[in-house]
Image (cartoon, rainbow, N blue to C red):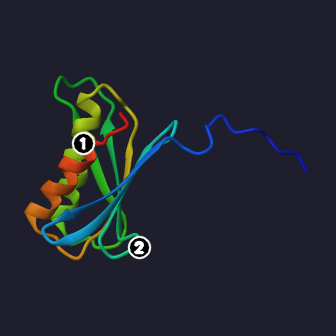
C-alpha cells in the first residue's frame, strides 16, 4: 500500500475565533488550503448550509462570480449574498482560489451576516 506525503502543512493554516454577533455566540474558523479557502461560521455548534463560491474565468473586464448551495437551505438568498461578498473580497485581494462557506446560524438577519463578513475579512488568510 503506497502512501504519499501531502504538500499541505499540517495543520492547515487557519484562524479560529469566537465573537458575539447580535447576542449570539458565533464561532469562526477560516482555513487556507492550497486550492480553496474554507470558512465555517456557526452559532449552533455544527455545520449548516454549505455554499461554494468562485470567480468565473473569462475575458470580461468585469468579473463574474458563481455561488451555489451544496447542502442545506436553497431558499435563503441572504446566505448566497454572504458568500458572494466574501468571494468578491477574495478576488479583489488578488487570489483566484474558490471559497467553501458553511453557515450554521440561529439568526439570518442582514446585521448578523454583515457582522460575520466583517469578522472574516478582519481575520482573513488571503
- Identify the secondary structure beneath mark 2: loop
Please tell me whether mark 1 sits on a helix, a strand or a loop: helix
* Residue 47 rendering spot, x and y as whole percentages: 40, 69
Q: Quadrant of the C terminus?
A: top left
57 in relation to 38, above or below: above
How crowded is the residue under tag 1: few (<14 C-alpha within 10 Å), some, or many (20+)? some
Q: Nearer the viewer, residue 33 or 125?
A: 125
Q: Is residue 87 visible?
A: yes
Foreground residue among 51 and 24: 24
* Quarter of the view holding residue 2: top right
Q: Residue at x 27, y 48 (%)?
A: 120
Mark drawn on residue 104 = none
Residue designated by label 1: 121
The residue nearer to you, when weighing 8 against 27, is 27
Residue farthest along the right direction in this orientation: 1
Residue 99, x across and y down, in percent: 37, 46
Q: In the image, residue 119 lies at what x, y percent?
A: 23, 49
Circle 2: is it few (<14), some (14-19), or many (20+) Cα within 10 Å?
Answer: few
The disc, 2 or 1, on the residue closer to the chain's N-terminal end is 2
> Does residue 102 appear in this view?
no
Image-based side of 35 in relation to 76, left or right: right
Whether the residues at callouts 2 and 1 have beta carbons within 8 Å, the answer is: no
Residue visible at 30% across and 42% down in the picture: 123
- Residue occupied by mark 2: 46
Q: Is residue 27 left or right of residue 117?
A: right
Amino acid at each position: 500500500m503506497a502512501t504519499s506525503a501531502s504538500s499541505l502543512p499540517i495543520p492547515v493554516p487557519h484562524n479560529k475565533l469566537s465573537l458575539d454577533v447580535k447576542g449570539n455566540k458565533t464561532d469562526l474558523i477560516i482555513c487556507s488550503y492550497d486550492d480553496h479557502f474554507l470558512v465555517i461560521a456557526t452559532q449552533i455548534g455544527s455545520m449548516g448550509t454549505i455554499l461554494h463560491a468562485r470567480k468565473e474565468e473569462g475575458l470580461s473586464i468585469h468579473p463574474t462570480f458563481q455561488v451555489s448551495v451544496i447542502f442545506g437551505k436553497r431558499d435563503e438568498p441572504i446566505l448566497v449574498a454572504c458568500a458572494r461578498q466574501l468571494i468578491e473580497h477574495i478576488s479583489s485581494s488578488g487570489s483566484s482560489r474558490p471559497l467553501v462557506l458553511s453557515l450554521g446560524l440561529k439568526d439570518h438577519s442582514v446585521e448578523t451576516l454583515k457582522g460575520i463578513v466583517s469578522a472574516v475579512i478582519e481575520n482573513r488568510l488571503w
